[in-house]
Amino acid sequence: MVAGPDDLVAELVEALPSGSHLFVTDFVDTGDPVQAAMERAGLETLGNGWIRSPEEIRAHFTGLPLLPLGLDFLARWFPEDPEAPVPAVEDLAPHQRVLMAGIARKP
């Protein structure tokens, strides 16, 4: 049986020493039509390209405290201008709402 992403991440986290960080990025499905189109394109052209809900991505961090910003859109983690305030979600362009990221620290 092939391990799923949750099993693979759990195995990785188990092997990490205390104080290590886990950084995860994943394509996200929050119901935006652009996200659904991207998933279809990945499946049709590459044979894979599954995207996950924020809850499914957050599950990778089970038992680990997330660092600020928590789990959020990647565009909010790395604004183009580091001196500018973090953009509001509603100000993100559709292409900026396809990836989420989070960082957690293993106690």
Image: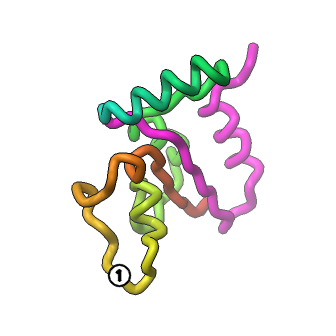
What is the crowding at mark 1: few (fewer than 14 residues within 10 Å), some, or many (at least 20)? few
**Local secondary structure at mark 1:** loop
In the rendering, at what x and y percent does residue 68 appear?
Answer: 41, 68
Residue 64, percent across and down?
53, 54
Find residue 98 and report its image quarter: top left
Q: Is residue 74 above or below residue 62?
A: below
The verdict on residue 65 being magenta is no
Disc 1: which residue: 84
The colour scheme applied to this rendered structure is rainbow
| Vertical arrangement, residue 5 with respect to residue 18, above or below | above
When asked about the image quadrant of residue 72, the answer is: bottom left
Q: Position of residue 76 (x, y in %)?
A: 39, 64
Q: Is residue 65 above or below residue 19?
A: above
Describe residue 53's horizontal placement relative to residue 62 as left or right: left
- Of residue 4 and residue 83, the one placed in the foreground of this image is 83
The mark total stands at 1
Is 26 within the magenta?
yes
Residue type at mark 1 is Ala
Pick out the residue farthest to the left. Answer: 90
Taking the spot 41% from the left edge, 59% from the top edge, the residue there is: 70
State the extent of the magenta-drawn residues as a range. 1-30
**Above or below — where is 11 with respect to 46?**
below
Q: Position of residue 35 (x, y in %)?
A: 40, 34
76 sits to left or right of 107: left
